[in-house]
Amino acid sequence: MADIDTDRLGSCPKCGGAFESVRVGPYTVDRCSMCGGLWLDERELERVLAMDHRALKKKRADTDPGASKSGKMGKCPRCGGTLIKLANLRANVTTDSCSVCYGIFLDADELDAFDHPNLAGRIGQLLRKLIGRH
Ligand SMILES: [Zn+2]
Ligand SMILES: [Zn+2]
């Protein structure tokens, strides 16, 4: 459980595309090369909270969110667990979260929903709620 391999992710749960590592500032995140969705491991959450959201938006400028409209989610790319929908009305976003390893998939549209001046605070709140920490 504790030693989840971080080397490779499976295919994107949304579109089946391949994840690629994208550097955002000092950090590396896993982004789908096709739909622009992000996969966050539980332990990556804290890092993402400190990220400059604008950098993420910029990084996904060359992706095609329109390719991700099927609406059907696959399995967790990390552990193969079931992804469940978690709605957060306050943040006005629904995320897909793994019920096994607590990874979170954020699709490109959801990133757009985070376009807010206080994004760091907002996404922090959201993610902390998602993983039940305060
Ligand atoms: Zn994808
Ligand atoms: Zn998982």
Image: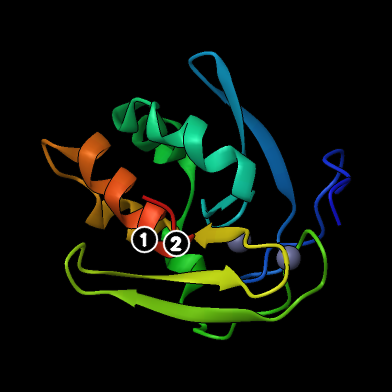
Q: Horizontal and vertical percent for residue 134?
A: 36, 50
Residue type at mark 1 is Lys
Q: Which residue corresponds to the image point at 64% horizontal and 49% vertical from the top-left?
A: 41
Task: Categorize mark 1 by other alpha carbons within 10 Å: few (<14), some (14-19), many (20+).
Answer: few
Q: Which mark is residue 132?
A: 2
Does any portion of residue 99 appear in the rendered image? Answer: yes
Q: Nearer the viewer, residue 29 or 59?
A: 29
Relative to 8, say whether 82 is above or below: below
Q: Is residue 114 left or right of residue 23?
A: left
Question: Can you tell which quarter of the image residue 108 is in?
Answer: bottom left
Q: How is the image coloured?
A: rainbow
Residue type at mark 2 is Gly
- Read off the residue under disc 1: 129
Q: CA distance from mark 1 to mark 2?
A: 5 Å
Q: Is residue 126 left or right of residue 92?
A: right
Q: Which residue corresponds to the image point at 66% horizontal and 70% vertical from the top-left?
A: 13
Q: Nearer the viewer, residue 53 or 81?
A: 81
Q: Horizontal and vertical percent for residue 58?
A: 37, 30
Question: Can you tell which quarter of the image residue 82 is in?
Answer: bottom right
Q: Which mark is residue 61?
A: none
Relative to 60, say whether 112 is above or below: below
Q: Secondary structure at mark 1?
A: helix
Quadrant assignment for the N terminus: bottom right
Task: Categorize mark 2 by other alpha carbons within 10 Å: few (<14), some (14-19), many (20+).
Answer: few
**Residue found at the far top of this picture:** 26
Does any portion of residue 32 appear in the rendered image? Answer: no
| Discs 1, 2 touching: Cβ within 8 Å | yes
Relative to 86, say whether 52 is above or below: above
Q: Secondary structure at mark 2?
A: loop
Q: Which residue corresponds to the image point at 32% horizontal and 44% vertical from the top-left?
A: 124
